[in-house]
Image (cartoon, rainbow, N blue to C red):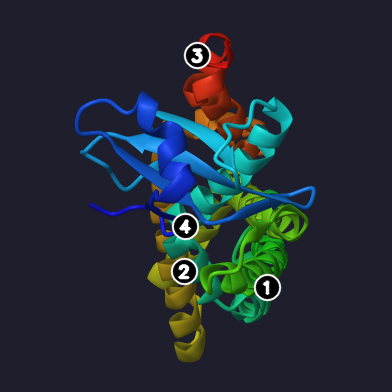
Amino acid sequence: MKLLWIMSPAKGVFKTALSPFKRGLQQIYMSSEMVVDGEAYRLVGIYPMSVLLRMETNFEKFAIVDQTGRLVPDQNVTQRCLRMYQLIVTLDNNAGYLKKNLAVDPQSFVPIIRHVEELGKKVLDRLGEEQGRAAQAHLDGYKQYLKQGAQLGERINSSGREVLRRLEPIKAGQPLREQEVAQLDKAMLDFMDDSRKRVLVLLESHTARTETKRLLSEALAQKWLGAGEEKLAQNIVALLENSFQVERVSIAERGAQTLEQAIWTAKNETRDFIGKHTADLLRQKWLLGAEGSSIQA
């Protein structure tokens, strides 16, 4: 059983506050301290015994509890605390993805743009005027994809490093202070949104990548290139083959059956998905939202 790292077994007034609502073998856990408008609170949740990794679906009910052990009835304060919790859930779920992206140097794509341009000239010399125009458009499209990917990669790395920097003191035990966490929230949303844009750029470049691979493969088969150029072309073809593997994964991750469906989904994904998940949890699992009138009575 693995709990979200900001959660620990509830104790003291926080455990007492939700004990009347606990059933059977359910467990009560509390979050790290959360500070909103200068006041300290904790999110306290009631969990089933079979706690799973994805914490946003784990607690059956939750409430925000103040330092005196009072259940906080204020929906605004509750939502703001819950958003901080949901942000940590998002960070935890995407920790591997974050590290993977930070391990890649976006500038490694820049030399490839120059190589594509040089190899493209050799290919165009072998084609007729009409074929050459079409080939040039595809090569330009691929170079544009590489350029945009590098630019987005720089932004992704920048926001990713900001996420890790701001997360460090929280992992060290610092309370979740709303004003500070808001900057972490923004950095994570920027990271995820630019990641979405990079996927969209990949998907929309499908034809350019397909045709560039075909052109370079033909150049290799027809021996249009010198020895050193052949090696470059082979490397770029391998890179293109890998891009199609990433494309297939990206389509599947969006629950799409076709490239067009995946493009539509990527274009229409909600930027503030943390806010959406927070609103869903508030509606579905807030103890006072579901039972508030009877509890307060």
What residue is shown at x 42% (from left), y 38% (from top)?
16
Quadrant of the image occupied by residue 218: bottom left
Q: Quadrant of the C terminus?
A: top right
Q: Nearer the viewer, mark 3 or mark 2?
A: 3
Q: Report the amino acid beneath label 1.
A: Glu
User: Which residue sits at x=64%, y=74%?
Assistant: 165
Query: Which residue is tagged 4?
Result: 6
How far is mark 4 from mark 1, CA to CA?
A: 51 Å
Q: Using the numbered discs, state the Cα–Cα distance from disc 3 to disc 2 in whole angstroms.
A: 43 Å
Which residue position holds label 3?
291
Answer yes or no: is residue 132 visible.
no
Label 3's element?
helix
Give the Cα distance between marks 1 and 2.
29 Å
Residue 102 shows in this picture: yes
Name which of mark 4 and mark 1 comes first in the sequence.
4
Count every numbered label the image shows and give the total: 4
Where residue 215 appears, as percent x and y from the top left, is 52, 60
Q: In the image, what residue type sits under mark 4?
A: Ile
Alpha-carbon span between mark 1 and mark 3: 65 Å
Crowding at dot 4, Cα within 10 Å, few <14 / some 14-19 / many 20+, comes out as: some
Q: Earlier in the sequence, mark 1 or mark 2?
A: 2
Mark 2, residue position: 100
**Callout 1 crowding tier (Cα within 10 Å): few <14, some 14–19, many ≥20:** some
Q: Is residue 256 above or below residue 16?
A: above
Horizontal placement of 192 versus 21: left or right? right
Q: Earlier in the sequence, mark 2 or mark 4?
A: 4
Q: Which residue is mark 1?
A: 117
